[in-house]
């Protein structure tokens, strides 16, 4: 069974492949920014760490770069092919 | 003159390269967003001159963030009265090509002659990343040079290229997917072994751990303030005796009269009482510089983000606020990396509550006068703890003020973090030393200009007019300064401030540390005696009640800011309203806090 998963729900130490980045509205600045940062379909991402309070923000590695994203932001990134490293 | 712009992703080393090319000493550090303004400098090679522009880092030209907009406007030639750059040096971090090449492609699409600088070529080699620059240059259609901006001669290949003058417009390739293209170029020309350095993985596992990470952060901050107090002490004694000897020397050399009084009491006494804090300020900066260089600061922002959101700020506010411990002015300018305007204004408004280094002299004097030098729990020192408490009080009130502002603006808008955490780096001792020398220069220049001038003016005001014969009070009572102090005393009397403090508060508006030298002048201290600041200390300790001392400490937590901070707030926000809000609320809080403290202890 595969449930729809976003980056916000990815467990620490798991990798996944980006399926799509959701646009919440016409002019979603966050999803646009995410695209500029390299969050595009087909990219592989790894969950490195969670923040101390409410597991927020999350630290994602994409390519060689680590980005801190709020859950709100990470929730826009839908992923598939989740596996542990 | 040829105009050359340095453009690239944040933290790719543009400013380090700029410093190499122009011989400047602009601030560099290991976190994204150090440069928020356009800087310009001159490159001289073999008799030719070029104008070099250092621009804020950007992820994309399609942006809302104030610092990235600067870069976009310069590159697109949208800045009035400025021509487009003749050459763009697109600086990329060789260890982070996937992200940086994407932006390089966006830059290429501008159609301006361009050269790609593969920066940090040395770390790429160390990590086993091999870049076939010929193939990459071929694929990109842009000439490539390799640079190591942090090493001497590391920009040599770039200056050679600039000198060759072989600039050409890149071939146009419209409507391509920048990501796909970057990926393709990398697969053709770059070999990458493992994804990140294992050291970074290990460090992040510990430093970002929910419990251990927060513990380490607290300890680091705490240790920093302890060190400022205890490690600096021997150096302060050294400065102090030097000043004392100078005073004695002048006193012996000159005949008595107004000139000698001005030099010994006004100049040496006044300046000496501030210069003594140089060691403490340098220790504070030693810590800040090491934190900045190592790449730890954005990690702290990661750990604290959620807490700061609760208070109406953002993790992004952390770096501007930490910079404000040095001085609120660079801190307020650093808020340009905050995209959300309201987050930015909130951060600007609370930045002055971070205890800036100019307040350190005032705190240090009052703590030494009123807080016993006693060990607590064996390892801590009560004076160090008090200092930590004062800094904490500033932080806590900043959080409170920010959350009140959050309630007032009641918006549901989503705010963003999206912060890049750079690779860790061992701080380079040479850079740290240069950074400290720069800070020392800034501090001494402040003393040389503002503080010196005010001290002399104040000395004149508190010496003249001289009292007539048969005057019952002290000479200063009769002077202009004394009269001013007496006339505003009623405003501050409820806080337990005597008229001498009132006199010192006024020049303190120009620069906070002047309050100390002003007190020295007002109490007519002569620097000719062995230990000038040790003289002010017993007077303060004996003349003021504990309640007055603590009330003045409380006053300075919120301290009516220095005028320069207000000017920067106006400039950065383009709003008189924000500036006036800052002024009024800080004055109000300072007054209330002192009133409360005075009545509590009286």
Image: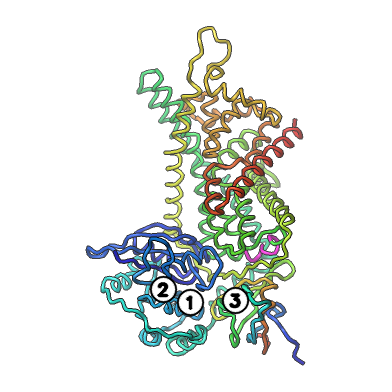
Residue on which disc 2 sits = B90
Horizontally, residue B388 falls left or right of residue B410, namely: left
Q: Quadrant of residue B415?
A: bottom right
Chain at tag 2 = B
The residue lying toward the viewer, choosing from B144 and B82, is: B82
The residue lying toward the viewer, choosing from B482 and B226, is: B482
Spatial CA distance of label 3 from label 1 is 14 Å
Residue occupying the far bottom of the picture: A1
Res A32 label: 3
Numbered disc in front, either 2 or 3: 3
Tell me if label 2 and label 3 are in contact, CB under 8 Å. Answer: no
Residue B95 visible somewhere in the drawing: no
Res B514 label: none
Rendering coords of residue B136 (x, y %) = 40, 85
The residue lying toward the viewer, choosing from B577 and B316, is: B577
Chain at tag 3 = A
Q: Which residues are magenta?
A: B300-308
Magenta-highlighted stretch: main secondary structure? helix
Query: Does mark 3 fall on the same chain as mark 2?
Result: no
Tell me if label 2 and label 1 are in contact, CB under 8 Å. Answer: yes
Number of residue marks: 3
Vertical placement of residue B126 versus A54, above or below: below
Would you say residue B301 sits in the magenta stretch? yes
Spatial CA distance of label 2 from label 1 is 9 Å
What kind of element bears circle 2?
strand
Vertical placement of residue B92 versus B339, above or below: below
Query: Does mark 1 fall on the same chain as mark 3?
Result: no
Chain at tag 1 = B
What kind of element bears circle 3?
helix
Residue at 44% from the left image edge and 33% from the top image edge: B453
């Amino acid at each position: 069974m595969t449930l729809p998963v976003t980056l916000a729900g990815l467990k620490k130490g798991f990798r996944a492949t980006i399926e799509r980045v959701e646009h919440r509205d016409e002019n979603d600045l966050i999803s646009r920014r995410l695209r500029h940062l390299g969050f595009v379909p087909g990219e592989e991402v790894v969950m490195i760490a969670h923040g101390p309070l409410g597991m927020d923000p999350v630290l994602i590695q994409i390519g060689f770069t680590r980005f801190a994203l709020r859950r709100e932001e990470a929730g826009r990134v839908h992923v598939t092919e989740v596996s542990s490293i | 003159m040829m105009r050359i712009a340095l453009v690239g992703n944040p933290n790719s080393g543009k400013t380090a390269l700029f410093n190499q090319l122009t011989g400047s000493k602009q601030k560099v550090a290991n976190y994204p967003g150090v440069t928020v303004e356009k800087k310009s400098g001159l490159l001289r090679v073999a008799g030719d001159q070029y104008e070099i522009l250092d621009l804020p880092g950007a992820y994309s030209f399609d942006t809302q963030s104030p610092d990235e907009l600067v870069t976009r406007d310069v590159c697109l030639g949208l800045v009035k009265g400025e021509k487009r750059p003749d050459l763009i040096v697109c600086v990329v971090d060789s260890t982070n090509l996937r992200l940086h090449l994407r932006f390089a492609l966006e830059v290429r699409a501008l159609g301006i002659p361009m050269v790609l600088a593969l920066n940090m070529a040395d770390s790429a080699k160390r990590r086993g990343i091999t870049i076939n620059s010929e193939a990459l240059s071929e694929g990109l259609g842009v000439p490539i040079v390799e640079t190591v901006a942090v090493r001497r001669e590391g920009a040599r290949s770039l200056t050679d290229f600039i000198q060759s003058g072989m600039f050409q417009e890149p071939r146009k390739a419209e409507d391509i997917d920048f990501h796909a293209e970057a990926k393709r170029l990398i697969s053709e020309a770059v070999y990458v072994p493992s994804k990140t350095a294992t050291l970074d993985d290990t460090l992040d596992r510990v430093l970002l751990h929910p419990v251990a990470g927060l513990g380490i952060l607290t300890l680091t901050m705490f240790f920093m303030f302890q060190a400022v107090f205890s490690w600096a002490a021997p150096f302060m004694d050294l400065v102090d005796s030097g000043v004392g000897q100078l005073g004695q020397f002048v006193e012996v050399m000159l005949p008595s009269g107004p000139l000698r009084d001005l030099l010994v009491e006004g100049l040496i006494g006044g300046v000496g009482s501030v210069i003594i804090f140089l060691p403490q300020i340098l220790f504070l900066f030693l810590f800040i510089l090491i934190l900045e260089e190592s790449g730890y600061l954005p990690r702290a922002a990661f750990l604290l983000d959620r807490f700061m959101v609760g208070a109406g700020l953002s993790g992004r506010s952390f770096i501007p606020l930490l910079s404000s411990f040095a001085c609120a002015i660079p801190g307020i300018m650093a808020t340009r990396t905050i995209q959300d305007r309201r987050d930015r204004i909130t951060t600007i408004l609370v930045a002055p509550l971070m205890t800036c280094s100019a307040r350190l002299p005032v705190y240090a004097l009052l703590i030494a006068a009123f807080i016993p030098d006693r060990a607590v729990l064996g390892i801590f020192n009560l004076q160090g703890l008090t200092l930590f408490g004062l800094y904490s009080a500033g932080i806590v009130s900043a959080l409170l003020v920010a959350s009140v502002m959050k309630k007032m603006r009641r918006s549901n808008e989503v705010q963003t973090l999206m912060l890049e955490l750079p690779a860790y780096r061992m701080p380079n001792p040479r850079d740290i030393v240069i950074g400290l020398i720069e800070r020392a220069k800034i501090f001494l220049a402040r003393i040389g200009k503002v503080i010196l001038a005010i001290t002399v003016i104040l000395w004149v005001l508190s010496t003249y007019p001289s009292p007539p014969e048969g005057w019952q009070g002290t000479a200063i009572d009769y002077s202009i300064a004394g009269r001013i102090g007496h006339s505003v005393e009623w405003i501050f009397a409820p806080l337990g401030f005597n008229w001498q403090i009132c006199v010192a508060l006024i020049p303190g508006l120009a620069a906070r540390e002047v309050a100390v030298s002003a007190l020295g002048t007002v109490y007519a201290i002569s620097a000719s005696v062995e230990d000038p600041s040790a003289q002010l200390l017993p007077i303060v300790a004996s003349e003021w009640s504990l309640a007055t001392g603590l009330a003045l400490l409380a006053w300075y937590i919120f301290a009516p800011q220095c005028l320069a901070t207000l000017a920067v707030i106006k400039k950065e926000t383009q709003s008189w309203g924000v500036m006036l809000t800052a002024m009024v609320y800080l004055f109000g809080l300072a007054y209330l806090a002192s009133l409360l403290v005075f009545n509590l202890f009286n």
